Structure formats: C-alpha cells, structure tokens
Image (cartoon, grey):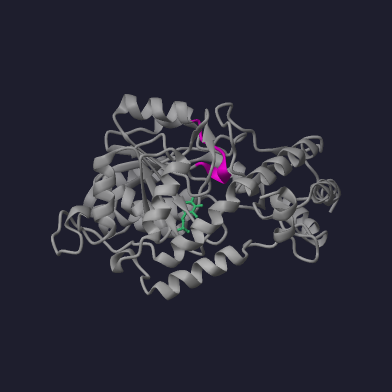
Amino acid sequence: MSRRALMASAMAPNERPSWPVFGPLEESSVLEALRSGRWSRSSGGRKVLDFEEKYAALTGAKYCLATMNGTSALIAALNSIDVGPGDAVLLPPYTFVATLNVLLMQHALPIFVDSDIETFQMDATKLDTAYTQECIAVMPVHLGGAAVDLDAVMNFARRRNLKLVEDACQAHLGEWKGRKVGSLGDCGCFSFQASKNLNCGEGGALITNDEELANRAYAFHTNGRPKEVGSGLAYSRNGANLRMTEFQAVILLAQMTRLEAQSRVREENARYLAGMLAKIPGVQPARLHEGCTRNAWHLFMFRYLEDAGVPRAQFLKALGGKGVSASSGYTPLNKEPFLLKMMEGRHYTRIYGQKRMKQWLEQNECPVNERLCREAVWLPQTVMLGSRSEMERIAEAVAQARKG
Ligand SMILES: *Cc1c(COP(=O)(O)O)cnc(C)c1O
C-alpha cells in the first residue's frame, strides 16, 4: 500500500490518525467467515491455520500457534516448558501486568531484574545477581517494541541452562540483529489486542522453532488433545481452551497486509521525533540497543528528567491541553499491593516456606525502575502514524509544556 493511501485511510477529519485502520478487505473477510458457518478450527475452519502459516513465515519461526489473546499465548508457553509451583522465573518490573500474572497463575516465584534507565529494558547485566537455584526460565519483554539485549539474555540462559520465553506482545516485526524478536528464544509470545500494532480486538500467538514445544503448546491450548487425533477424545496432557476463532484470524490476515507499511511510517516518524526531542534539555528518548535493528515502536518512550521543568504530572497536563495525549506509563510492578499480599499469602507460604518468602520480600528491590517510573513519558503507536508535521507539532508542544 502506498504511503498516501495508508495515511488517507488512517486519517480522521482532524488530521490525526484514527485506530483501528480498516476497509473493504476486513469487511468482506468477516462476512465470508460468517457465511461459511465454520466459525472455529474445531468446526472445520481453515483461516486460523492460514494465519498461523503466514505469521510463522513473517517471523521466520518454524511453528506458530494462534491463541485467543497474548495472555493465553504466555500461559500456553509456561505450560509447555513446565513452569509450576517451586520454580522461579526472571522477569522485568517494567512491563504490562500480564507478564507477571501468568507466573502467578502457575504459582511460580517471580524474580524481578531491575531496569536499565537508558533503554527502559530489563538490565541483562543484572541477571546473574538475580539468579537463584530455583530459576528454570527467564522471560524478558521487548518493551515498547524495542528489543531487550538478546545476546546477553541468550548467553545467560544458555550458561544457566534456563528456558527463554520472549514476551514480544508489543514487538510485531521488531528485530534483533536482523532476526525477528520472538523467534530467538525457546518460544515467543505476541498480542493482537486492540491497542497493539497488529490488532483483531483480542488475539495472540506463540511462535517457536521447537517441534516438541509446538506440539505441547498445541495440545495445551485445546484441552490436552494432540493434533494427530483430530476430533477424537484422546488426551496427551492437561490443558485449557485458548483457541482463536475464525473471526479473529480473518481480521488478522487482512490487517497483516497493512502492517509493513504502517511500521515504516511509525519508524520514519519516530526517528524524526526522537531527533527533535533529544535537543530539548531534560528530555531523553529511550536509547536502543545496538542489536535492535528494527523497533516496532508500539510505544514512543522518553524520560522527562526531574530538573526538566515543571513536575511530570503538570507537564503531562499541559501536553494534553495542547492536544498531545501522553501517559506516565507503568508504576513499579514489583511493589504492587496485590502481589505483596499474594507473596505473604497461604499458597506461596505453603509452597516456598515462610523463610523464603520473607527473603523474597527483602530482596524485591528495583531502585532504577522506580526512578524510571517517575520519569517516563509515553506516546502510543497510533500517534506515530501521524503526519511529519504532526511530529513537529508534538516536539513544539513538549518544549512548551516543560514550562507548564
Ligand atoms: C498486551 C501485553 C500482554 C497481554 O496481551 P493480551 O492480548 O492483552 O492478553 C502481555 N505482555 C505485554 C508486554 C503486553 O503488552
């Protein structure tokens, strides 16, 4: 699709991009799926399968399993590498709560690895210090669409003999040294929830190059029934029903025809905006790791330093007044009251013992992340679909809003 055609369909009358972007292709695809009467892969639909093949090809992974959402892709991943009570998993504190919730569902022990202030990603140099004997996996997040230092994480996982699950829920088309993120670890998980760069309202996918893992994940996602037996009632394991519907798949197939062109627009705009913002005192766009050869730009993230001007809340309010909707991003996940309550609660105390949980609470400190949470400012991916002059307007608004 040409840039002009793309922008025309993405622009609302007020010159701001609207989201989601759709047209006759999505309309006819949904109608066709409806009229086929085959609304699920379990009733003979072939569109989920078609999506899985195309998404595997797009990411360069051997296998893809479509799921009902990103959270269920992560649940299928953890169940495929057998994470359960007594196991610890390393994760970043700067992420969406789902990354943590899926570990809590397995009653695994979450061990937070502090953030890197410049890249906003998990600080891979702190993995060894955070590691304990209980660890069986590491679950980094490619936050905002930019890659974590995957060389360092892969090296660590290999050395410690840990499974590597990439939470790539924000990183469609993101790359590490020319390879698609999500395809480098044991498996990678994506979300197609309404706010994500590839969107079907709710949706998810797990990709992997490991045939056995793919088979375990497939069976898990359809209540333990392996692929080979078709519709028969034979079980190879436990499971749940995390199946994607045909309606989700046809929307994804249509949206995938727009993804590359949209990503290019985001990249071009983000680079232009980052250059302008970097010149404003006290404003620091998130740095990319050198290996991050392509950023999905799900979020445009920058730090608003404490001495940049008026306090951040006032800055954000002033930005809003100028028609720029920015957010303050995540709050420290490792200090969430619901989490601390669970860590002191009955199940965790029974599984890990009172002494271990007391130690967990004492060691649960991510001071860099707390600073990041105080300084972060985000612009959503939809803003990056705007025009070049819109980027100039945003940079100007940021420079002005510092004064309140
Ligand atoms: C969106 C997201 C998820 C969860 O995906 P859903 O499709 O909303 O279930 C998990 N992790 C991260 C980092 C996300 O951004």
Which residue is depicted at the point 65% across and 38% down? 286
Q: Is residue 179 above or below residue 214?
A: above
Q: Is residue 390 above or below residue 113?
A: below
Q: Is residue 200 above or below residue 197?
A: below
Where is residue 271 shown, x and y percent of the image? 72, 38
Residue reaching furthest to the left: 234
Q: Main secondary structure of the magenta part?
A: loop
The answer to whether residue 341 is magenta is no
The answer to whether residue 191 shows anywhere in this view is yes
The region drawn magenta spans 142-149
The answer to whether residue 84 shows anywhere in this view is no
Count the marks: how many? 0
Tell whether 263 sits left or right of 86: right
Which residue is depicted at the point 50% across and 58% down? 252
Tell whether 31 sits left or right of 314: left
Where is residue 58 shown, x and y percent of the image? 48, 43
Res 134 quadrant in image: top left
Pick the residue in front: 52 or 219. 52
Pick the residue in front: 250 or 332. 250
Where is residue 227 shown, x and y percent of the image? 22, 54
Tell whether 183 sits left or right of 286: left
Pick the residue in front: 269 or 39. 39
Which residue is depicted at the point 39% across and 58% down? 48
Res 60 quadrant in image: top left
Pick the residue in front: 197 or 312. 197
Which residue is depicted at the point 22% across and 51% down? 351
Q: Which of the image's four quarters has the C terminus?
A: bottom right
Where is residue 255 shown, x and y percent of the image? 55, 57
